[in-house]
Image (cartoon, grey):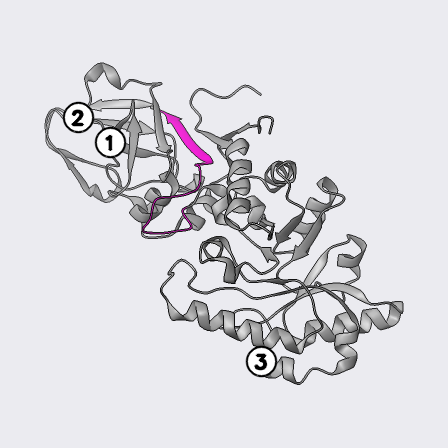
Amino acid sequence: MAIDPAQAVLTIDLGALAGNYRRLQRVAPGCEVAGVVKANGYGLGALEVAAALQGAGCRHFFVAHLEEGRALRARLPDAAIFVLNGLPGDGEEALRARLIPVLNHPGDLARYAALAGRRGERLPAALQIDTGMCRLGFAAAELEQLEPSLREALDLILVMSHLAVAEEPENPLNALQRERFERLRRLLPPAPASVANSSGIFLGQAYHFDLCRPGVALYGINPTPGRANPMAPVVTLEAPVLQVHEVRAPGSVGYGATWRTAPGARIATVPVGYADGYLRAASNAASARIGGVSVPLAGRVSMDLLSLDVSALPPDAVRPGTVVTLIGGPDGVDQLAAAAGTIGYEVLTRLGSRFACRYIPPGPL
C-alpha cells in the first residue's frame, strides 16, 4: 500500500513485541504468560498483535468484550480466550465462540449455572475475586455465601484477582491483596490462579502463581516506573514537516497564542493533531526529534496539526518533507504521557486510525 507523503506513519514492531513476551517469560519462569489484547491490542491491532504473540508461544489471551473475543477466535482457533468484563447475556454466545467468561459477581454465576443446567453439563469459566481494587470481582462475603450447587456448575479454569498498585513495589497493599487472594481462593474448587499484571510480574515469584497477565509491558510501556525500562520499544510515530515559518516579527503560535515567538525563530508545522490521538494536554510540554535533536512542541495541539520550534536546528535541516519522530525510542510513549499528565496506556489506546500503519513482522526465533 502506497503511503501519502504528507501522512504520518505509525510503525509497530511485532518482533519487539514478541521479544517483550519472551522477556516476561524469563522473569516469570515456570509460570504461563498470557497476552492481554483488549482495546484492539492497546490500539495497535489486536489480530496482528495476537498472531505475533502466538508465534512467540502465547496460548492464553484476554479481551474485555464478547465482540473482541469473537474477532480473535477467527484468527486463533485453538487459543484460550477469556472475556474480562463478565458474562455476556446468558452465556450462549460466548459458549458458541468457545470463549471463557470471567465471572465477576453472583449474578454472572447464577446465569451461567442456569445455562449449565439447561445443557446438562459443567461449563468452563474463570472467576475473579475483588481483593482491594473495588472494580470487578466477588467480594469475600459473596464467596463465603455461595451455594455449593453454583460452584458445582463450573468447570473452573482460572481463579484471578487484579493488583491496584503493582507499579509501587513497596506499597503494603500488594502483599495485603496477595494474602486475601490466597485465603479467598480456598473457598473455591482447586484451579490455576492468576494475580500478576505487567508490573505485578516484577514483584517477584510470590505473585506469579500459575498464570501472569501482562498487557502494557508487551507494548513497550515501562512496568517498573522509576527504574530503567526492561521492555523494548514497539511503537514509532513519524510525520513529515508540511511547512516551515521564518518568523520576522514578534508573534505567537497556534490557538490561544500560548507560545510567543521572536524574530529569527523557525516554526515547523506537522500533520498530526488530537483527532489522530495525539493528546491536546501535551501542548507546550511535549517534544519531538529531528535528526536526533530534541525540539519542543510550540503552542496548542489542534485537530489536525501541531507545531514545533525548530530554531535550534540549521535552516537546511528542516524543510517540507523532513521526517519528525513524535514517538520513538525506549521511553517514547511514556515521555509523551508524562508531558500530557497521563499514562502510556492512554497514549497508546488513543492513537487514531488516520495514520498509515506499518507492521514490522517478527523475525525467526
- Circle 1 sits on which residue? 295
Q: Considering only vertical position in the picture, is 137 above or below 67?
A: below
x, y percent for residue 191: 69, 66
Q: Amino acid at mark 2?
A: Ala
- Circle 2 sits on which residue? 312
Range covered by the magenta-colored residues: 222-240
Which badge, 3 or 2, comes first in the chain's sequence? Answer: 3
x, y percent for residue 123: 80, 65
Q: Is residue 365 magenta?
A: no
Q: Main secondary structure of the magenta part?
A: loop
Residue at image coords 58%, 47%: 37
Can residue 134 be seen in the rendering of this structure?
no
- Res 305 → quadrant: top left
Which badge, 1 or 3, comes first in the chain's sequence? Answer: 3
Residue at image coords 68%, 45%: 72
Between tags 1 and 3, which lies in front? 3
Which element type, helix, strand or loop, lies under badge 3? helix
- Circle 3 sits on which residue? 140
Can residue 285 be seen in the rendering of this structure?
yes
Q: Amino acid at mark 3?
A: Ala
- Res 280 → quadrant: top left
Residue, far top? 316
> Which image quarter is the N terminus in?
top right
